[in-house]
Image (tube, rainbow, N blue to C red):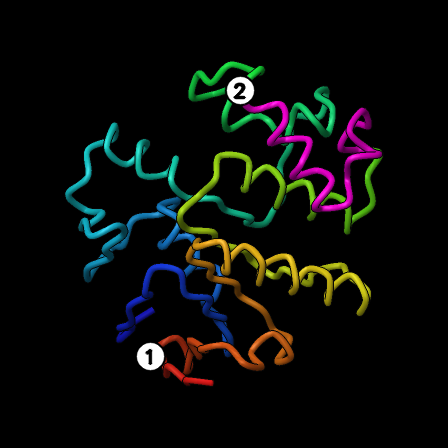
Amino acid sequence: MRGLSFALAPGSFHVVAGGPGKTEVLRLIALVDRPSAGVVQVFGRDVATLSRREAALARRRIGAVLYPLRFIDHLSVWDNAALAPRVIGRKPADFAGEVDAILKWTGLFRRADARPAELTGVERHRLALARALANRPELLVVDEPDGAMEAADALRGQKLLDEIGRAGATVVAASRDEAWAEGRPVLRLQEGRGVLVERP
């Protein structure tokens, strides 16, 4: 991946489209990987200069849905969705209502007691999104939000992410479906060497 140069304004919603490299870009933005060259800045900081503690704190401000989707199989849907606030030490009484609301919003509330293995592919993707949102991220990164979805579910996914963006989070979604690019700025990869920013 060479020659990439772009900036995401706070509260914007961009779609990453085009050739190979979409997932790599998302992993860099989400602080899962560090760049081997060049500069990646997240929240105004060069990620190469972040200590392990600073990187961990920055990740708390990021929600990520990246493949492969991984869950703790022996925990319920509800407990998987509640992992982020639990890990940082919030009390269940403080976040239980938020988790319930997110599961209702993503259409999983009636499946709250199920285990991940009992979910359909679409439901697993919704659970990953619910988990990513549980800590109220400032930046949400979603790989293939329409993966394994029928047209109606994909449209619902678009509406959910639009609502997240309107709530003030910066959203970056990578998709091969050109329908996601309609009306949104697009970061179009060109043979892994550059990005063309298209304004709607």
Residue carrying label 1: 194
Secondary structure of the residue carrying tag 2 is helix
Check the picture and name the quadrant holding the N terminus.
Answer: bottom left
- How many numbered discs? 2
Query: Of 162 and 52, which appears nearest the observer?
Result: 162
Q: Residue at x 67, y 36 (%)?
A: 101
Residue 81 in the image, given as x and y percentages of width and height? 63, 31
Residue 146 in the image, given as x and y percentages of width and height? 68, 63
Could you classify mark 1 by the number of other residues whose Cα lies within 10 Å: few (under 14), some (14-19), or many (20 or more)? some
Q: Please report contact status of discs 2 and 1: CB closer than 8 Å, yes or no.
A: no
Q: Residue at x 70, y 21 (%)?
A: 75
Secondary structure of the residue carrying tag 1 is loop
Q: Which is nearer the N-term, disc 2 or disc 1?
A: 2
Residue 76 in the image, given as x and y percentages of width and height? 74, 24
Residue carrying label 2: 94
Which is more foreground, mark 2 or mark 1? 2
